[in-house]
Image (cartoon, rainbow, N blue to C red):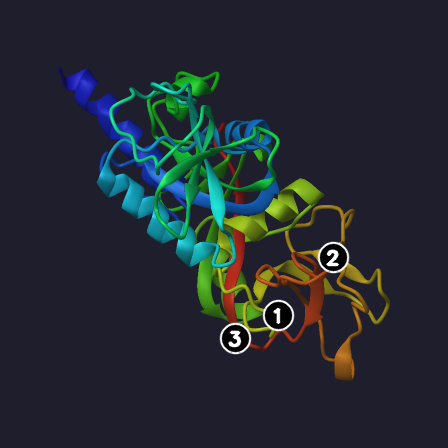
Amino acid sequence: MRFLSIFLLLIVQLVYAACPRDGAVGSNGNCFFSLSFNQTSNQAEHFCANYFYAHTASIQSAFDNQVVLNMARDTMPNAAQVWIGGTYDGNGITWNDGSPDVYKNFGPNSDPGDIVLNLATGKWATAAWNTNIPFICGLGGATTNPATAQPTTSCQPPCPDEWVYVAEFKTCYKSVYGVDFGTADLNCRSLGGVLASIHSDEENRVVSELFKAGLGTNDGNSELLIGGKRTGPGIADFTWVDGTPWDYHPWASGQPDNTKGNEYCLEIWADRTDANSQKWNDCTCTNKYRAAVCKQPAKY
């Protein structure tokens, strides 16, 4: 009995450690979080599984449906519908995470197919598997336990509490809020990490999606500070404060421009909806930013 209690406690710790700040916790302690870029049903499931040891979300109650609906509306105000993690055969539901078929919330005349949540009505419908729309991941369902999904017997979660574990990179991320560069750097280091470096399109997209504000704005008020620092006036004169190679840099159009010779730090335009969405801009280090992203290696 004592072992079972410890095991269940570990599951809860892992779910809470892995739930992004803009995610939502359901009735059973499972974590739901939104990804606002478009994928087919299969691609969405693979993304949740490969990056988070999760699945597209299963919804097991009216309470959880409302939790997911509210979260999706807040974080994706321009989306009409999102993938969740079930397939309907006209009678029953098969959930990708193995959860039981105990709750249904279909609107009228729903045909067999992969299930979507309508963000206007809160009801479910079905769509062709190759429809490209945003999606909801769920962590902590019937088969989404990182303690058993990973090749380890460790009794420690891969990340500290309140850090987000991204399995694909074996990395933990956390945001700190309302900081300039110097304060963000100190805060990240005091938490055991460092301001984040980013090394691929995949990592840039994951960080942007996890820590965006959900504002859907192009007015520059949703900056996301990361760990790049200018070392000189040139376009390539940047380095990462964690010492990793400067090998990836998706600059926004016309950037970096070092306005007034005073832009020595680096931000992601995570909330923009135009062509510069998730692109980078050089910025003033002394500004106070909405959020900064910390990073540290996962334990496994």
Which residue ends up furthest to the right in the rendered image? 234
Q: Amino acid at mark 2?
A: Thr
Residue 53 image position (x, y, % from top left): 47, 28
Q: CA distance from mark 1 to mark 3?
A: 18 Å
- Please tell me which residue is depicted at 64% across the width and 50% down the height of the picture: 197
Compared across the picture, whether 11 is left or right of 247 comes to: left
Which is more foreground, mark 1 or mark 3?
A: 1
Residue 115 visible somewhere in the drawing: yes
**In the image shown, does 215 or 144 lie closer to the viewer?**
215
Residue 153 image position (x, y, % from top left): 40, 16
Q: Are marks 1 and 2 in contact (CB under 8 Å)?
A: no
Q: Which residue is mark 2?
A: 239
Q: Which residue is mark 3?
A: 288
Q: CA distance from mark 3 to mark 2?
A: 21 Å
Q: Amino acid at mark 3?
A: Lys
Check disc 1 and report its element: helix, strand or loop: loop
- Please tell me which residue is depicted at 32% across the width and 33% down the height of the picture: 59
Any mark on residue 218, and which? Answer: 1
Compared across the picture, whether 30 is left or right of 259 comes to: left
- Please tell me which residue is depicted at 28% across the width and 46% down the height of the picture: 66
Q: Earlier in the sequence, mark 1 or mark 2?
A: 1
Image quadrant for the N terminus?
Answer: top left
**In the image shown, does 84 or 185 lie closer to the viewer?**
84
Check disc 2 and report its element: helix, strand or loop: strand
Quadrant assignment, res 84: top left
Q: Are marks 3 and 2 in contact (CB under 8 Å)?
A: no
Residue 162 image position (x, y, % from top left): 37, 46
- Please tell me which residue is depicted at 25% across the width and 22% down the height of the picture: 7
Q: Is residue 20 above or below residue 253?
A: above
